[in-house]
Image (spheres, rainbow, N blue to C red):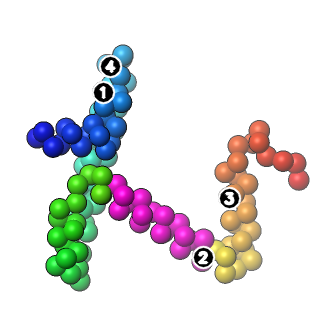
Amino acid sequence: MELFFKELKSTLGFAQCRLRRFEATEGWLELVLVTFLWLEWHRARQLAKSGLTTKQKERWRHQRTHGLCLAVRRHSEQADLEYLARAMQTPGGIRRLRRKLRQAIPAEFRTAG
């Protein structure tokens, strides 16, 4: 139980929560708990995959919250890079990427043109 609270505080930022308004604190706690549960669900899905080596299964089994966060971030970044690589293969994909990049810049910072 102590490890659980330590991970909520250090990795998921619950220590940064200030107890000013009960509703805000309650919402922050719910967000932290849902994040923790989602990470554990993700770990369970990884462990259920067929074809994992014993070493890979052990790594997922012993992964703590910080490592799970890093693994999810790394997976997300890899998926983004694969999307970009696919989109760069066609003129339509390049146009879509340019449009998305323009939309990512707030309107007040966009240049005319």
Pointers 1 and 4 in contact (C-beta within 8 Å): no
Task: Work out which quarter of the rendered image holds the N terminus and state it.
Answer: top left
User: Could you say where residue 24 lies in the image, as x and y percent from the top left?
Assistant: 37, 24
Label 1 – label 4 distance at C-alpha = 9 Å
> How many angstroms separate mark 1 from mark 2 (CA)?
41 Å
Q: Amino acid at mark 3?
A: Lys
Amino acid beneath label 1: Glu
Which is more foreground, mark 3 or mark 2?
2
- Asked whether residue 23 is drawn in magenta, I would say no
Viewer-side label of 1, 4? 4
Relative side of 64 to 28, left or right: left
Furthest-top residue in this view? 20
Q: CA distance from mark 4 to mark 3?
A: 39 Å
The residue at 17%/43% (across/down) is 4
Depicted 101 relative to depicted 109: above or below: below
Residue tagged 1? 26
The residue type indicated by label 2 comes to Ala
- State the image quarter where residue 108 is shown: top right
**Residue 21 seen in the figure:** yes
* Sequence order check, earlier mark of 1 and 2: 1
Which residue is denoted by mark 4 in the rendering? 19
Q: Which residues are magenta?
A: 69-86
